[in-house]
Image: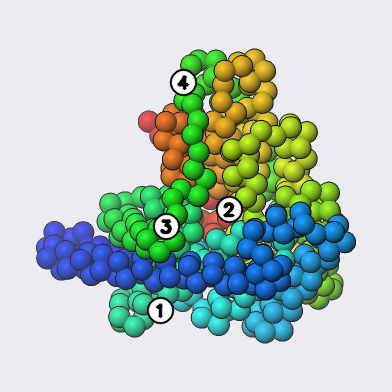
Amino acid sequence: MMDSPVTEDPESQNGGNLQLLRLLGVAVLVGVLGALAVLMFHKFLLLFESFLYISNNGLVADAAGMSPERRIIFPALGGLVAGLILQYFLMRSKNEHGSDYMESIIAGLDVPLRSTLLKSLSSAATIISGGSIGREGSMVQLSALLGGLSGKVLKLSYSERRFAVACGAAAGLAGAYNTPIAGALFVAEIVLGSISVGSFGPLLLAAVISDSVVRHITHVGPIFATTSSQLQSIPELLFVLATGVMAGLFGPLFIAALNKAHLKFASLRIPLWLKMALAGLAVGGLSAIRPEVWGNGYSTVNSLLHQEWLWQSVLLIMLLKFFATVLTSSSGAVGGVFTPTLFIGAALGTLAGGITQFFLPSVSVTAFTLVGMSAFLAAVTHAPLTAVVMVSEMTSGYDLVPALVLSSLAGYYISSVLHPASIYARSIPSTHPTQKPPSPTF
C-alpha cells in the first residue's frame, strides 16, 4: 500500500502543511490534464467511428445497420489490427495485460510513455471495431501518464510522483464517467487499499477538477441519468437482498471465466495478432445474433433504464455480453471491463426487477436495474463503497442508496468468500490489502 505523502510528524507540521498545499496544487493541475486526456481520447474514437461507419450514432446503432456478415468481420479485423500494434510495435513487458497505472502506483514504477500510447492506439482499434471492452481503461491510463509526467517536470519526490499518478487515475475515471467521488474512491479503495484523510483529499480534488472540466466542455450530465422510485418496504428490500445474492453468485463465475480464458489464450502457440483476430471473429459471431454485443454497452444500459424489454431478450444479451467480454479481454485486448460489468449488472438487475414486479406489481424495474449494476460491480471489484457511490453519481439515483448498499454488500461478501481475488487480481500483488478476504473486527 502506498504511504501517505503527507507528513504527519508534529515536529514538521509546517513542512507537512507546505507539502499538502503542494500536493493540492499538483492535484488541480493533474485534474485538468486528466480531463483533457479523456476528452482527446473520446474525440479520437468519435473521429475513427465517423471515418469507418460514416456515422456517430454509436456502435450498437452502427452494428444494427450492418449485414450479419459485416457485423462478424469488423471485430475480427479490429482484433487483427490491435494485435499487430501490440506484437510488432510495442516492446512487450511483464503484466502486459494488467492495468499499468495500478502497477505504477503500487510498485512505484513510472508509467511508460511509449507503451501507454501504443496500447491506447491498440485499444482504440478494438473498441471502434466492436470489441466488448471499455474505453475507460485507456482514458485512465493516459490520465495517469500525464500525472506521472507532471511529477517529473515539477521534480517532485518519489512518493509525491507516485501520488501524482494516483491523482491522474482518479481524474481519468472521474472524467470518463462524470463521477468525481467514485473516481477518488476507486483509487483509494481498490488501488491503494485504504482511505485516509491525507491521501483522499488530493485524490478527490483531482477528480472533481477533471469532472468539472469535462462537464464544462461537453455540457453533459450524469451519463445514465434516470428516475426511479425508492425501494424501502420490507418485501422490496428482501428482493433487493436476493438481487445482491444473485450478483454475488454470478460475479465469481465472471471472474473465473476471465481468468480461465486468459490462461487458455496465453497457452495457445500462435501469434498474438491471430489470437485477437480469432477472438474478434467469435465476438462478431455473437453480435450476428444481437447487435448489442458490440462496444462497451453504454447505449444498451441507457436503453434498459428507459425502455421496456422482454425478459427473454435481456437474458440473451446478458449471456452474449458475458462471453463477448470474456473473449475480448482474455485474448490480449487492451481496455477496461468496467462498463461491460455495468452492462451485465444492469441486465441482471432488470431480470430481477421483472421477477419482483410479478409479486409486487407497483415496484420499479428501473430501480432494480440500478441495484443490479451496483451489486454486480461490487461483486467483481470487491469494492462495495465505490460501487454504491459510482452508480449513484452516474444515475442521480441517490434515493436508492439504502437499497444499493444492501445489494452491494450482499454481492461483495458472497463473491469475496467464493472467489477471494477480485477482477483486478492480476494487476495487484497478493500481499495487497484488497487481496485479502473480508474479516470484520469488533
For the point 56% across and 21% down, the residue is 363
What element does badge 4 sit on? loop
Q: Are marks 3 and 2 in contact (CB under 8 Å)?
A: no
Q: Earlier in the sequence, mark 3 or mark 4?
A: 3
The residue at which mark 1 appears reads as 149
Q: Earlier in the sequence, mark 4 or mark 2?
A: 4
Q: Is residue 413 above or below residue 86?
A: above
The residue at which mark 3 appears reads as 219
Amino acid on which disc 1 is placed: Leu
- Residue 95 at least partly seen: no
Amino acid on which disc 2 is placed: Phe
Q: Earlier in the sequence, mark 3 or mark 1?
A: 1
Q: Give the number of the mark in front: 3 or 4.
A: 3
Q: Are marks 2 and 1 in contact (CB under 8 Å)?
A: no
| Label disc, if present, on residue 338 of the rendered structure | 2
For the point 59% across and 35% down, the residue is 369
| Label disc, if present, on residue 232 of the rendered structure | 4
| Label disc, if present, on residue 238 of the rendered structure | none
